[in-house]
Image: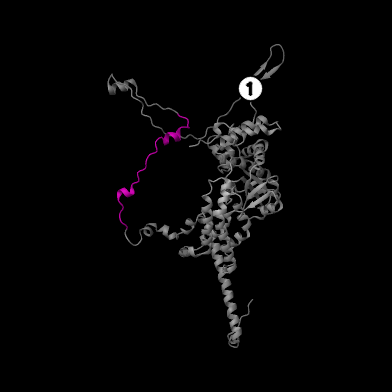
Amino acid sequence: MAKKYTEEELNNCSKEILITLLLNMQEQMDTMNQNMEHLIELLASSNNKLYGRSTEKLSAIEGQMDLSEFLNEAEYTVGDTEPLEPKAEEVIVVRKKQKGKREADLKDLPVEVINHYLSDDELTEALGSKWKKLPDEVYKRVKYEPAKYTVEEHHVGVYAATDNQTIIKGNRPVSLFRNSIATPSLVSSIIDAKYVYSIPIHRKATEYKSIGLNISTQNMSNWVLKAADEYLYIIYDMLHAALYKYHVLQADETPVKVSKDGRPANSKSYMWVYRTGKNYVPPIILYEYQLDRKANHPEEFLRGFEGVLVCDGYQAYHKLGNENDSIKIAGCWAHARRRFAEAIKAIPSKHKDSIKDTIAHQAITKIADIYNTDNKLQKLSIDERQKERQLKVKPKVDDFFAWAKEIRISGTLPEKSKTTSGIDYCLNQEQYLRYFLEDGAVPLDNNSTEGAIRNFCVGKHNWKLIDTINGAESSAILYSIAETAKANNLNTLRYFEYLLTELPKHQDETDYRFANDLMPWSDKLPEICKVPQS
C-alpha cells in the first residue's frame, strides 16, 4: 500500500519529491481510468450480448440508438418542425401481381376437389326449365390437418401342406427393431423434431399424448439411439470417408454438458464440427463428440486428409498444421473483425457521434473493404480468383496489417480493451489470415461452419445437456446426417424415413457399397426425399 503523507510532511518535501509524487499520482489515475473504461466496456459488451443485435455489419453497429428514441418514437421521428403531408401517389405502392405464382406454389400439394353444385330442382326454381352449365368457378384454399398416426396390423399368411406337417409363411418386411412397435416413419418423426427443429423429446411425447398416442420418453430415446447405433452410423462413416476427397475443409467446436461421463458435475465436453469448404458441392457437415478440447481430436478425425483447414485462432488447429506438412491452416476474418465490433457496440449511445473516430471503427472499415473486394470475385474460377486476389485484395490486406502494427507500436491503446485485443489477435494470426490470398478455393472466413453448428447450439439450450457419452456420440451421428441433408436440399423427415426403411434390409452385409445410393446427393433417392425447388 502506498504511503500516506501528512500535511506537515508534504510541506517539508523538496520540489523534486513533490514532482515525483505528482507524476506517480497521474500514472495511478491513468491506470484507474483505463481500468474503469475496461469495466464499463465489459459491462456494455455483456449487456449487448444479452439484449443487443448479434450482427457485425458496420451499418447496424453505427446505427445504435438510445432506448428513449424507441420509447418516444412518435415525438423523436417528427422532430422540431412539422413535416409536409405526402401526396397519395407517393404513399400508395402499386404491386404488380406475379401471374401464376399461386398455382406454382400449390402445384405439388395433393388436391381434394370439393363440389358446390345446385340440384336440378334448385336450378329449375331459379332459372326455369331451360338452362345450361357454364365452366366452373374455381378457387383454392390450403387446409391443415394435424399429424395422423395409423396402427399397422400385419397379417402374415400361414400355410400347411395337407399330406404332411410342412408349414410355410408369407414374406414379411424387415422390422426396424425386433418386437417393437416402432416404424421408420415414427422414429423419423422423433429424430426430425429433435435434431432438425430442436424440440425436446419430452415435448414430442406431450404432442403425441394430445392425439391419443402414449409413448414414453424412454422408449422414444431408446429408438433414436438404436437407429443411430445400428443403422445410421453407416451413412456417417461414408460421409466421413468422402470428406477427405475435398481440398478445403472448415472446423469449429462448441461446449456441451454430459451428465454421466465419469467426471464431476458440469464438466465441459465438446461437440466438434467439420464441413467441406463453403464453395464445394455437394456439401458434407459432420459432428464429432469428445470429452475435451485437446489438439489430438482434430488430428485423429482428419487423419489422412491433405489440404487446407479453415478455422479460428484456437491453438489445437495450429498444432495440427505445424506437425503435418500435408495440412495448411487458413484463418477466419470474421473472428478478426468480431472484437472490433464488440468494442463499437460497447460505446455508450450518447457517444455514438464519435464512433467513426475510433480505432475499432477504422479496423472494421478496412476489413469491410477487404470483404467487399473479395466478394466481387466469387463467380470467378478458383485459379482466376487467386490471381485477382493477388492484384486487388492483397494490397488491402497489406495496408491493414501495416496500419495495425503502427497502431500497436504507438502505445496509445489501453492494454485491456476490446480494441487492443482485436489488434493483437490480428497480428498474432497474420500468417493464417493471409493464407486465403494464396488459394482461390479458400473462403475469407469460417462463418459457414458456425452456421452449421448453430442448430446444435439452439438444441442444447432447449435440452440443456446430454445424459451419456453414448447419447452424445449418437447425437453427433444424427446431427451430421440432418445438417448434411439440409445442405443438400433434402426433406430431412422423408430422408431419415427412407434410410431407416432401406438400411435394415442390409443389416447383415459387410460391404457398404449399397449405401452409395443412399447418400444425400445420390440421384437414386426418391423424389419425396427432395425439397421441391421453386
Residue lying at the far left of the rendered structure = 128
Residue lying at the far bottom of the rendered structure = 12
- Residue that appears at 62% across and 46% down: 248
Q: Is residue 121 left or right of residue 66?
A: left
Where 408 sits versus 498, above or below? below
Q: Nearer the viewer, residue 239 or 106?
A: 239
Q: Amino acid at mark 1?
A: Val
Where 210 sits versus 11, above or below? above
Q: Is residue 80 left or right of residue 24?
A: left
Helix, strand or loop for the magenta stretch, by majority: loop
Where 204 sits versus 6, above or below? above
Q: Position of residue 388 (x, y in %)?
A: 55, 51
Q: Can residue 308 be found in the magenta stretch?
A: no
Specify whether residue 459 is in view.
no
Q: Can residue 88 be found in the magenta stretch?
A: yes
Q: Position of residue 264 (x, y in %)?
A: 69, 53
Q: Which residues make up the magenta segment?
A: 83-111
Q: Classify residue 275 by image quadrant.
A: top right
- Residue that appears at 45% across and 28% down: 112
Q: Classify residue 37 by image quadrant.
A: bottom right
Q: Nearer the viewer, residue 112 or 380?
A: 380
Q: Secondary structure at mark 1?
A: loop
- Residue that appears at 45% across and 64% down: 353
Where 307 sits versus 188, above or below? below
Q: Nearer the viewer, residue 232 or 68?
A: 232
Q: Nearer the viewer, residue 277 or 238?
A: 277
Colour mode?
one colour
- Characterize the local packing of mark 1: few (<14), some (14-19) or many (20 or more) Cα atoms within 10 angstroms: few
On the image, numbered disc 1 is attached to which residue? 156
